Image (tube, grey):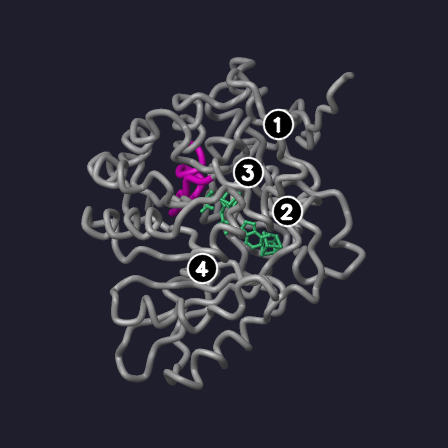
Amino acid sequence: MQQKVISIQPETRPPEAKPPRYDGGPLADTRRRPMRDLRISVTDRCNFRCVYCMPREVFDANYKFLPHDALLSFEEIARLARVFVGLGVKKIRLTGGEPLLRKDLAKLVAMLAPLGAELTLTTNGSTLAKHARTLKDAGLDRVTVSLDSLDEATFRRMNDADFPVAKVLDGIAAAAAAGLAPVKINMVVKRGMNDGQILDMARHWRNSGQIVRFIEFMDVGSTNGWRMDDVVPSGAVVRIIGEHHPLEPLEPNYPGEVAGRWRYRDGGGEIGVISSVTQAFCGSCNRMRLSTEGALYTCLFAQQGHDLKALLRGGAGDERIRDQIAAVWRRRANRYSELRTAQTAGLPKVEMSYIGG
Ligand code: SAM
Ligand code: SF4
Ligand code: SF4
């Protein structure tokens, strides 16, 4: 019997024949948002099957991941990153899929570090203990590690790969020891799955020097069965923690920072909340994403990307690529989270593991 083959990689828009010349002025989109933050997905593969991101029923043995030659090479990524930094990007985050599954990732870090942008990585932490020192030595500035629960059974149920908590904790400890601190720890809160462990998580990282961030479960992609009822609003998270350990709000570190910051009144450190569902922050969104195969997305919920790989592989010069990126950014009008409804949640959207979280 023939096996079903699933592929949900989206269509991309080809490069324009003649984009307007970039004049060197400040680059802003239609809502006057600058371009500041670039997330680069280095692989669409992952060794976890988190229920909210890569549900095993879809990302199973028949799922067709990208073939190796479809991926941007490190040289191609570094070339594009240089153009982006030239256009004003101040921060680069490597992500995926699971970025540490990409062979020799530290080599890419070493190629990007001289560009001068802040360089960070988001990982599930499964192999971080092994890589933390090499990544730091290559020039990585900071790391964010996803950890949805400290309870063994809950964590294994959420990563759906039977992966133990202790190994992720080892990775976080190794990152802190290597100087990649403060480590940010991301917990996606899904009602009925791990919302009972919000307080435990906060207490574990209080006074540790690391920063835990609680993320509202989002309707990214089209496969995770998102329902508004499964979202635990950040306001509730702050209340649950604050009842036991009083909190006060902090100013953002920089314009457009995704996480709302709160500090323990007794000096026990800070937490973050990422409220993309209940308090949309599109008004200051300065992020764009480069997919594993070199398509540019101006919103996490975009339905279509812009093909930059065709330019790279078609022999375009840096100026031509710069003009294209600038034209895409200047036309940008995205504000999905401000418009979200139960209907929009059901629309086809690019998967987070493909576009980069
Ligand atoms: N594999 C790496 C990891 O898990 O850290 C990097 C990629 S992952 C897509 C990036 C971040 O997106 C993780 O912190 C993950 O928890 C978050 N994420 C994935 N799906 C999400 C969803 N439906 N809602 C909210 N956050 C999500
Ligand atoms: Fe993998 Fe990260 Fe998605 Fe989990 S959230 S399935 S670790 S890419
Ligand atoms: Fe930015 Fe799109 Fe998220 Fe709004 S929905 S904050 S525009 S990525």
The kind of residue tagged 2 is Arg
Real-space Cα separation, disc 3 to disc 4, in angstroms = 41 Å
Disc number placed over residue 332 in the picture, else none: 2
Asked whether the residues under the numbered discs 3 and 4 touch, taking CB atoms below 8 Å apart as contact, a structural biologist would say no
State whether label 3 is within 8 Å of ligand 3.
no
The answer to which of marks 2 and 3 sits earlier in the sequence is: 3
Q: How many angstroms separate mark 1 from mark 4 (CA)?
A: 27 Å
Please name the residue shown 58% across and 31% down the image: 295
The residue singled out by tag 4 in the image is 149
Q: Position of residue 310 (x, y in %)?
A: 59, 20
Q: Foreground mark, 2 or 3?
A: 2
Structural distance between the alpha carbons of marks 2 and 1: 37 Å
Task: Please name the residue that numbered disc 1 is placed on.
Answer: 61
- Between disc 1 and disc 3, the foreground one is 1
Residue 93 on the magenta segment:
yes
- Mark nearer the viewer, 2 or 4: 4
CB within 8 Å, label 2 to label 4: no
| Secondary structure beneath label 4 | loop
| Residue 106 drawn in magenta | no
The quadrant in which residue 211 appears is bottom left
Could you tell me which secondary element the residue under label 3 belongs to?
Answer: helix
- Mark 1 or mark 3: name the one nearer the start of the chain: 1
Q: Amino acid at mark 1?
A: Ala
Q: Residues within 10 Å of mark 4 (few under 14, many from 20)?
A: many
Q: Along the line of sight, which residue is nearer the eye, 147 or 143?
A: 147
State which region is magenta. 83-95
- Give the residue displayed 59% in from the left and 69% down from the top: 232
